[in-house]
Image (tube, coloured by chain):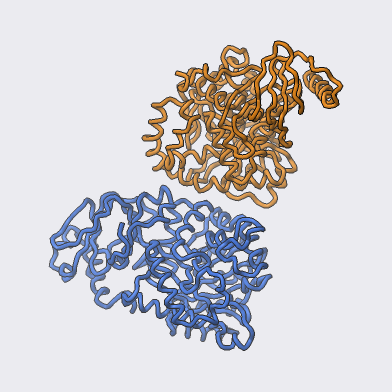
C-alpha cells in the first residue's frame, strides 16, 4: 500500500475508537499513540468540513501523519511541537482531478513525445509536482497523455513522492487513457513513429477493453481514464468513440477492481452522445465535457456522477481576440485548433448551465495547458459560473475525494483523516481568490510551505 | 408634430450652414462665446479644432469652424488649448439622503435635503449636468427636482422615477416603492405615481438567486407588459432593472424602453448583442457600483483623488477608508462583484461594438463615480471618443431627451464642460475641469456648498 501503512491502519482504528469515546481522555490516555511525536497546529480559523461553518481558535493534534484530535482553544502539551497559525485560515488540502505532470505549455511541445524519454519527463514532472504542492494542492490526479514514456515517468514520480525523495502532492495516476484506434489525444506522427511511441491502451471490443483496464490497473492505475470522444486534434472531433457495450465493460471492470472511471472528452458542438453514453455506462465523472446537453444534466443527477469542467484552461489557452490567438499558453498549436479553442472560449460556459441544473461539480483544472501552480485560478471561474465560494471549495476537497474513492482519508480535517491541510490569509468563503495565495502547506503531517 | 424648439433648432442649423459659406454676418446677439476651442460634440463625430461656440440664453445658437467676432456684451471664454464636451450625464443614481444603496436593496435614509443638495452639487462640480434617480423616496427626490426646476438652488438637471414600481417582496420593493401584484388592481397605485409626474418609470425584474443571494419574488412579465403600455400611453418612458440576459430579453419583448443595468450574471449569448443593436434600447452601464466594493476593500486610497476630496467630507472619507474598508473586505458580495465586473465589462463592450446603445450610469450617489465609470469603460476596451458619447448623447437617448440635451449642436440646451486636458487621448482628461455651464449659465464651482469651498 502506498499511503496507508499497516501501522497507521492500526493507529487509525485506535484513534477512531477514542474519537467515539470521550475525546477529553484520549490525549492523556496510555495508548501507544501517546508515544508518537505530536504536533499541534493553532489555527485562527478552520474550515474543517467544507459545507459546515468555519471554527475559530482551534488546536489540531497531529500524530503519524493523521489528525488525532481537534479541540477548541489554543492548547499545548508537553513535548508537542507547536505550529502557530493563529492569524491564518486553515482548510483541507486541495485536490485537483486533472493535471498533466509531465506536460508544460511550451513551444515545441508537439515533439516532446519523440524527443523526451521517461527520465526527461520525470525530471520535468518533479519540478511541476513541487509547484503544485506549494500552490496548496496536496493531492492530484495525473490524467495521462497516452504515451508510455509519460506513464512510466508519472509512476516513477509517484514512488519518489511516496518515499519522500521529492516534494510533491499525493499523486494519483491513470497511467494512460483508453482510446480507440486513431482517436487518442496524443499528437499523431507517421505510422512508423506511432508504431514505436504510439498511444497506450488502444482497445477494440468488449473483451479487449476489459483486458486493457486490468493491465492498466496492474501497471499501477488509481483511476481509469477513457477518451469517450475523439481527439481535439482532429476537427471536427468524433462525438463518440467506444460503443455503449465497450463503455459498460470498461466501467464495470474498473469498479470491480475498486477504481473510479472518468470520461475525458466532449468537444463536439451540438453532439453530447459520447458524454451521455459514458454516464449511462456508469462512469463516476465526466471531465472536460465542453458541449453537454439537457440529457447530460439529467443523467449526472440520476447516476450521482460529477461534472469536472476546465474553465480556466480554456481562458488561458488562447488569446483574447482573433488577431491574438497565439498569445495564449497554447499558442504553438496549429491555427485551426487555436480557432476552435477561441470559439470555445467565446461560448457561454457549460458550467453556468450545469450550476443552474443543480449537478455536482468536482475540481479539475488541466495544468499542462497552463503553468502548473496556477490551478487555483479555476476557483474564480467556478464562482463566475454561479457556484458560491463554499461550493467551489467543496469541489476541490470532499467532492474530489469522493471521485478518487478516498473520502475516508482525504477531503476534510476530521479525526482519523490524513493531515493534509493548507492555510490562507483570509476567509476563502468570502473571497475565493484567497486560494490563489496559499501561505502554508502540510501533507501527511509534514510542513512543505511556511508563511 | 414638431415641438417649437425643434423648429428653432432646424432654423438655426440652416443659418449655421450659411455661416460656413460666409454669407452670414457675425452680428448675432449672444451671451457667451467660447473661442478657439477643440470641440468634441458628443455625437462621436471627429473633433473640431479651433471651433467657436456661441450661447444665447440657455441654448447653443451657433457653432463655427472659424473664429467669430464676439458681439458686443458677450462674455468671451478663450478656449485655446482647451477641450469642450457636452455636460456629462448619469442615468442611474440613487441620491443619498433619501435612500441608501445596500447589497440587499434600498434602505431609507435621513430625508436630509442638505445631504442631497451637497451630493447633487458634487455632480455639477464634477462636470455632470444631469442625473436620473432610479428609485428613491418620492417626496424627497421630487422635492429636489422642484428646487432644481424652479431655479431656487443651483443643481444639475434632476430626472427621476420617484419611487420604484415592482412586485411585493421583489427587488426594489423597499422604501418609496409603489407595489403592484395584479391588474387592474395596480391602476390606482400607478395613477398615484403618475400624478407625481415621473420623468421615466423604473420597474424591476429580478428574482436574485445569484451572487450567493437567496431567491425572492419576481414581477410577472405579463403585468410588466401591461404597465409599460399604461405608462407609455401617457407619454412616460420605462426602464427596468434586470441582471440576467433572460430577464433583459423578457423586458425587451414586454416593450421596455431602456435597461437599467448590464447583464452581469454571466457572458451574454452570441445573439444578444445583435438584438440590442437591432432594438437600440439603451442599456445603463452601472459598473461602478459592483467594482466600488472591492476598490474600497483593496485600494481605499482612491478617495485621496482630488474630485473625491472636493465633494466628500473629510470625516466621511476617513470613515470609508477605515471602517468601510474593513467592512467590505469581509463581505462575500465584494469579491463576487470583483469577479463578475469583467464579465459585465465584456458584455457592454460587445453590445457597444455591435451597434447597441449603452449609456453611462453608476448606480452611485457621487459625481466622481461618473469618472470612475468612464475609466471602467476604457478598461473594457472602449475608445475615449465613444465613452464621451456614452456619457452624453447616449445618456440623453436613454432618458428620451436627446432632442434637447446630450450633444453640442445648434439649438440644443447649453449644458457644456470646458476641460484643460484632452479626454480623447485619455478619458481621465475629463477630470481636468475648467468651466461647467448649465443652461447657458456658468456654474461658479468655487461657490458651491462643498467641502472644497469651505
Q: Is residue B423 visible?
A: yes
Residue located 47% across and 84% down the image: A214
Q: Which percent across, then down, holds residue A300?
A: 54, 63
Image quadrant assignment for residue B120? top right
Residue appearing at x 34%, y 51% in the figure: A54
Can you tell which quarter of the image residue B165 is in?
Answer: top right
Residue B152 is situated, as x and y percent measured from the top left of the image, at: 58, 12
Would you place residue A205 above or below residue A321 in this image? below
Nearer to me, A154 or A29: A154
Q: Is residue B127 above or below residue A210?
A: above
Residue B387, percent from left and from top: 64, 38
Specify the colour of chain B.
orange
Q: Quadrant of the N terminus of chain B?
A: top right
Quarter holding residue A47: bottom left
Rendered hue of chain A is blue
State whether residue B226 appears in this view: no
Tell me which residue sits at (43%, 74%) in the image.
A125
Which quadrant: the C terminus of chain B?
top left
In the image, what residue occupies the spot 48% across and 46% down? B336
Q: Toward the viewer: A270 or A370?
A: A370
> Where is residue B125 drawn, in percent x and y?
55, 24
Amino acid at each position: 500500500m502506498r499511503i496507508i501503512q499497516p501501522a497507521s491502519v492500526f493507529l487509525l482504528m485506535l484513534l477512531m475508537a477514542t474519537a467515539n469515546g470521550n475525546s477529553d481522555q484520549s490525549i492523556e490516555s496510555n495508548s501507544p499513540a501517546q508515544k508518537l511525536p505530536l504536533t499541534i497546529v493553532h489555527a485562527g480559523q478552520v474550515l474543517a468540513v467544507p459545507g459546515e461553518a468555519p471554527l475559530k481558535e482551534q488546536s489540531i493534534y497531529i500524530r503519524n501523519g493523521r489528525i488525532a484530535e481537534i479541540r477548541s482553544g489554543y492548547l499545548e502539551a508537553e513535548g508537542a511541537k507547536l505550529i502557530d497559525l493563529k492569524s491564518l485560515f486553515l482548510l483541507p488540502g486541495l485536490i485537483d482531478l486533472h493535471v498533466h505532470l509531465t506536460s508544460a505549455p511550451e513551444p515545441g511541445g508537439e515533439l516532446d513525445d519523440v524527443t523526451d524519454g521517461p527520465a526527461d519527463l520525470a525530471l520535468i514532472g518533479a519540478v511541476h509536482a513541487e509547484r503544485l504542492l506549494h500552490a496548496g494542492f496536496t493531492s492530484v490526479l495525473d490524467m495521462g497523455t497516452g504515451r508510455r514514456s509519460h506513464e512510466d515517468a508519472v509512476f516513477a514520480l509517484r514512488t519518489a513522492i511516496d518515499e519522500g525523495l521529492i516534494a510533491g502532492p499525493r499523486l494519483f495516476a491513470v497511467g494512460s487513457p483508453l482510446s480507440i484506434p486513431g482517436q487518442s489525444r496524443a499528437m499523431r506522427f507517421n505510422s512508423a513513429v506511432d508504431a514505436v511511441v504510439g498511444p497506450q491502451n488502444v482497445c477494440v471490443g468488449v473483451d479487449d477493453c476489459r483486458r486493457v483496464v486490468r493491465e492498466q490497473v496492474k501497471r499501477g492505475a488509481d483511476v481509469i481514464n477513457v477518451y469517450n470522444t475523439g481527439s481535439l486534434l482532429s476537427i471536427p472531433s468524433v462525438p463518440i468513440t467506444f460503443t455503449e457495450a465497450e463503455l459498460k465493460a470498461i466501467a464495470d471492470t474498473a469498479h470491480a477492481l475498486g477504481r473510479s472511471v472518468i470520461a475525458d472528452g466532449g468537444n463536439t458542438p451540438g453532439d453530447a452522445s459520447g458524454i451521455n453514453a459514458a454516464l449511462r455506462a456508469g462512469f463516476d465523472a465526466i471531465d472536460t465535457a465542453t458541449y453537454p446537453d439537457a440529457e447530460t444534466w439529467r443523467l449526472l443527477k440520476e447516476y450521482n456522477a460529477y461534472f469536472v469542467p476546465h474553465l480556466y484552461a480554456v481562458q488561458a489557452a488562447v488569446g483574447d481576440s482573433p488577431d491574438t490567438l497565439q498569445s495564449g499558453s497554447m499558442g504553438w498549436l496549429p491555427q485551426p485548433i487555436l480557432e476552435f479553442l477561441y470559439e470555445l472560449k467565446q461560448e457561454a460556459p457549460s458550467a453556468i448551465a450545469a450550476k443552474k441544473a443543480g449537478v455536482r461539480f468536482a475540481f479539475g483544472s488541466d495544468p499542462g495547458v497552463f503553468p502548473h501552480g496556477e490551478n487555483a485560478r479555476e476557483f474564480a471561474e467556478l464562482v463566475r459560473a454561479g457556484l458560491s465560494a463554499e461550493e467551489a471549495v467543496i469541489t476541490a476537497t470532499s467532492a474530489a475525494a469522493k471521485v478518487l474513492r478516498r473520502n475516508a482519508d482525504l477531503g476534510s480535517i476530521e479525526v482519523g483523516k490524513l493531515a493534509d491541510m493548507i492555510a490562507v490569509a483570509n476567509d476563502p468563503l468570502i473571497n475565493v481568490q484567497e486560494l490563489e495565495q496559499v501561505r502554508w502547506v502540510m501533507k501527511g503531517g509534514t510542513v512543505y510551505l511556511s508563511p | 408634430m414638431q415641438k417649437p424648439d425643434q423648429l428653432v433648432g432646424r432654423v438655426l442649423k440652416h443659418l449655421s450652414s450659411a455661416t460656413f459659406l460666409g454669407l452670414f454676418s457675425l452680428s448675432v446677439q449672444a451671451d457667451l462665446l467660447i473661442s478657439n476651442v477643440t470641440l468634441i460634440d458628443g455625437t462621436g463625430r471627429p473633433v473640431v479644432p479651433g471651433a467657436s461656440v456661441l450661447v444665447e440664453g440657455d441654448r447653443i445658437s451657433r457653432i463655427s469652424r472659424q473664429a467669430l467676432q464676439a458681439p458686443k456684451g458677450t462674455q468671451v471664454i478663450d478656449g485655446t488649448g482647451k477641450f469642450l464636451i457636452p455636460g456629462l450625464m448619469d442615468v442611474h443614481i440613487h441620491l443619498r439622503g433619501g435612500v441608501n444603496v445596500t447589497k440587499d436593496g434600498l434602505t431609507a435614509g435621513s430625508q436630509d435635503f442638505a445631504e442631497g443638495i451637497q451630493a447633487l452639487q458634487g455632480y455639477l462640480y464634477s462636470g455632470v449636468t444631469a442625473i436620473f434617480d432610479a428609485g428613491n423616496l418620492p417626496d424627497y427626490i421630487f422635492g429636489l427636482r422642484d428646487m432644481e426646476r424652479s431655479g431656487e438652488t443651483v443643481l444639475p438637471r434632476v430626472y427621476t422615477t420617484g419611487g420604484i414600481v415592482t412586485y411585493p417582496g421583489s427587488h426594489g420593493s423597499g422604501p418609496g416603492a409603489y407595489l403592484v401584484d395584479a391588474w387592474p388592481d395596480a391602476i390606482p397605485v400607478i395613477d398615484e405615481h403618475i400624478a407625481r409626474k415621473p420623468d421615466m418609470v423604473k420597474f424591476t425584474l429580478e428574482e436574485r438567486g445569484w451572487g450567493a443571494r437567496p431567491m425572492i419574488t419576481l414581477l410577472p412579465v405579463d403585468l410588466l407588459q401591461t404597465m409599460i403600455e399604461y405608462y407609455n400611453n401617457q407619454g412616460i418612458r420605462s426602464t427596468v432593472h434586470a441582471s440576467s440576459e433572460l430577464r433583459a430579453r423578457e423586458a425587451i419583448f414586454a416593450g421596455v424602453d431602456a435597461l437599467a443595468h448590464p447583464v452581469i450574471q454571466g457572458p451574454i449569448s452570441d445573439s444578444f448583442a445583435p438584438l440590442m443593436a437591432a432594438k437600440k434600447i439603451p442599456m445603463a452601464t452601472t459598473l461602478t457600483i459592483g467594482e466600488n466594493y472591492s476598490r474600497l476593500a483593496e485600494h481605499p486610497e482612491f478617495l485621496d483623488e482630488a474630485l473625491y476630496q472636493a465633494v466628500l467630507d473629510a470625516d466621511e472619507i476617513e470613515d470609508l477608508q477605515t471602517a468601510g474598508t474593513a467592512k467590505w473586505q469581509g463581505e462575500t458580495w465584494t469579491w463576487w462583484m470583483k469577479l463578475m465586473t469583467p464579465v459585465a465589462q465584456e458584455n457592454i463592450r460587445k453590445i457597444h461594438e455591435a451597434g447597441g446603445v449603452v449609456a453611462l450610469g453608476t448606480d452611485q450617489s457621487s459625481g466622481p463615480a461618473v469618472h470612475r465609470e468612464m475609466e471602467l469603460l476604457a478598461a473594457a476596451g472602449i475608445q475615449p471618443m465613444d465613452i464621451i458619447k456614452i456619457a452624453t448623447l447616449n445618456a440623453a437617448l436613454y432618458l428620451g431627451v436627446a432632442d434637447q440635451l446630450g450633444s453640442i449642436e445648434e439649438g440644443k440646451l447649453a449644458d457644456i464642460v470646458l476641460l484643460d486636458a484632452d479626454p480623447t487621448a485619455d478619458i481621465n482628461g475629463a477630470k481636468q475641469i475648467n468651466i461647467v455651464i448649465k443652461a447657458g449659465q456658468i456654474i461658479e464651482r468655487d461657490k458651491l456648498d462643498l467641502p472644497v469651498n469651505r
